[in-house]
Image (spheres, helix red, strand yellow):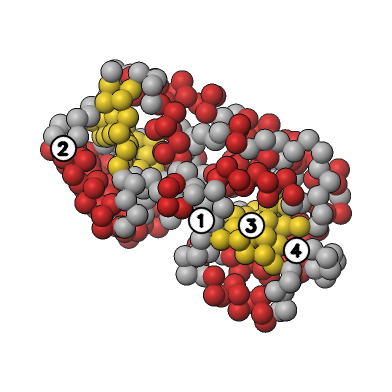
Amino acid sequence: MKNVLYTGHFLAAHRGTVSPSERVAHHLQGQGFRINITSTKKSRYSRLLDIIICSAMFKYTINHIDVFSGRSFLVAEIASLVGKIRRKKIFLTLHGGMLPEFYQRHPVRIKKVFKRADKVFSPSLYLKRFFEKEGFGVEYLPNPIDLAKFPYLEVYEPANKLVWVRAFSPIYNPTLAVETLLHVRQVFPDCTLTMIGPDKGELNKVKALMHQHHLEEAIEITGPVPNEELYRYYHSHAVFLNTTSYESFGMAVMEAAACGIPVVSTPAGEIPLLWENGKDMLITSCWSAESMADRVIQLLTNRYLANEIRQNARRKAEKYDWEEIKSRWIEILKGPDNSNLNNQN
């Protein structure tokens, strides 16, 4: 049985949201692998210390490391260095739509980490294309979803309610969702918005905007909701708003689509590569509340279009179910080919 260490932020117990790698690690347990994960610690510094200890002390053949930009990149730097010193195989999975900008600012740091890798993967065609242009070999390996947790709504007859599911962070533009509602209510005065997710610095701005436009009665802020409970919101709302500035895969978008709620999204990162405007999603050409609202109004006005989009989106989501993807993961972890895929010197 092969020992595999999964290194990243496994914080479902604290945040209620299961990360893609957390989901993969859970599914691979008992598939011919002994899986350990690091780290589940809530504190950033405790988590980093735990990752160092596990990378240095645990028995493993492969260390699969999630790679994010910003301060989180330090995890990949340390874990890959420790693993290479121990002569372990290093598999990297690239996440986060801000990685290209991070690479532009810190090319030397990223090249060092990539050079240690035996394989580099990404669930994002956007990231794959960017790093291939920079001379790195990146395999596309999409994130899996658990379709059983996101049942499809057969009968679509919701009220005029919008839902937004992200962290209240600048990169996810929560204020754009509020501004979109403001424009939609000019046509549908009864329209409301539910906002779900933890505060990452923007919640007070959202509340101030709500107060400024007298939207306190029209907007509900729930805080975080456990992943397995989200389908209830998707089934009771008419449109999912995706207002992000960066997108490397869009797990929340895919899960919403699986439930049968049509999505209106900005053209961030992966979105126009993974989704087809007018077929399985409505995608704006810019980050404008007016543009977002126009597409929401299209869906609220034309239920035939809404049904077409949500049905096509569900069919796409089915391709990303774990049962469709697991054979590729098993093949990768069991496979004999561990040659370095990177062309950078």
Left or right side of 236 for 80: left
Q: Which mark is residue 246?
A: 1
Residue 112 visible in the current orientation:
no
User: Residues under labels 2 and 3: Cα distance?
Assistant: 42 Å
Which residue lies under the disc numbered 4? 192
Residue plotted at (76% across, 57% down): 161
Q: Residues within 10 Å of mark 4 (few under 14, many from 20)?
A: many
Badge 4 or badge 2: first in the primary sequence? 2
Residue plotted at (20% across, 40% down): 55
Residue plotted at (81% across, 50% down): 158
Pinpoint residue 270: horizontal percent, then vertical percent: 54, 46
Q: Residues within 10 Å of mark 3 (few under 14, many from 20)?
A: many
Which residue lies under the disc numbered 3? 164
* Helix, strand or loop at mark 1: loop
Pinpoint residue 200: horizontal percent, then vertical percent: 47, 65
Which residue lies under the disc numbered 2? 57
